[in-house]
Image (tube, rainbow, N blue to C red):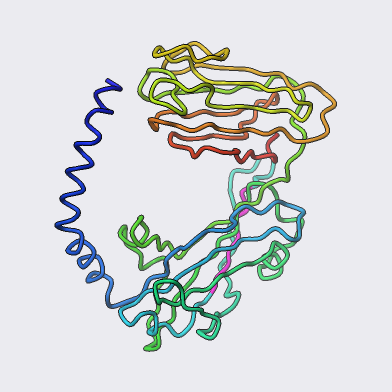
Amino acid sequence: MKLFKKTLLPICILAIFFTACEDSDQVVDGIVDNVERGAVLRTIEVVSNEIPIGNDESNFAVDLEIQDTENGTLVQSVEVWLGFRDNSVAEGGTDFSTTEEVLSETIDTSDFMIGEFGLPRFSYMITLPELVSALPISNSTVDGSDQFTIRFELVLVDGRRFSFADNSGTLTGSFFSSPFLYTATVVCPPKPPTPGVWTVEMQDSYGDGWQPTTANGGGPGLIVTLSDGTVFEIGLCTPYEDPGYDCSDGTSAGTATFTVPAGLEEAADFAFQGDFWGEMSFQIITPNGNTVGDFPASTDAGSLAIDFCKD
């Protein structure tokens, strides 16, 4: 079945290609027609949306582009609204708390620059101390897994406003990527992993083991490297070839463990090799029984963001 899926791919691509060549202008025109009365704020890049606790230089940062029917000139300014969600539930408690939004600042058109497509762009950054100062909270309030919300609101020259509440699926999707609302999560800084037996629960939605880098196999999906140089290669065995490492049995699901010794002074590196078919998911669990990473199918290859607050 893997080969069947792979064989059909070029045919599908050709069909989409010729259809797109014929209809792409109509599709784009239809999208623009639906939003021509307003304006959108397109995400160019989310530079940083994780805020390590205790680091005054940690920040949320994003690059944005303004789009409207007059090449961005309909927008008079951009308001920045901040909020805070306290996800740390006290022992015995059940409720999370959320602060009301506050207007942090107004970005004037004089702060815009013209981007590569001839449209206004600006970069926005706010540090952890600035976030705390702008909101009715204190440093002691902020803990791991808490979240700051950053919402942008476009103010047009005719007085109209556009923000998150005005969004549609078209605007938040891949074409415009215009959510207006962003979340910055508070994380704990990296630290040496807890000594003891760690567990990795693995799943494969297709039921034929892991193929992280090639159609047939390609080695381990997860590689854990301790600061003392110890390396653990982790993944589900595949029936298509010899994986070349000590994989875990189970084509649909399986469990692997690795032991972290005491005395390590630096954090471990958790590297994911990729997900060729978009079928691999896994969870990383500490010796304390806490899940410090829950990674869905199609997770990008590279170093994994571990929630050190739960380790």
Q: Is residue 109 above or below residue 93?
A: below
Quadrant that contains the N terminus:
top left
> In the rendered structure, does residue 177 fall within the stretch colored magenta?
no
| Quarter-of-image position of residue 255 | top right
Residue at 72% x, 56% y is 141
Q: Horizontal and vertical percent for residue 3?
A: 28, 22
Provide the residue span drawn in magenta. Answer: 80-87
Q: Horizontal and vertical percent for residue 114?
A: 47, 78
On screen, residue 200 versus residue 67, left or right, reads right
Residue at 38% x, 17% y is 208
Nearer to me, 23 or 163: 23
Nearer to me, 255 or 67: 67
Quadrant that contains the C terminus:
top right
Q: Is residue 285 above or below residue 46?
A: above
What is the magenta segment's predominant secondary structure?
strand
What number of labels is visible?
0
Q: Is residue 123 above or below residue 231?
A: below
| Quarter-of-image position of residue 308 | top right
Residue at 40% x, 77% y is 118
Q: Is residue 28 above or below residue 306?
A: below
On screen, residue 55 versus residue 247, left or right, reads right
Residue at 57% x, 75% y is 103
Q: Horizontal and vertical percent for residue 260?
A: 74, 22
**Farthest bottom residue in view:** 158
Q: Horizontal and vertical percent for residue 256?
A: 58, 17
Nearer to me, 128 or 227: 227
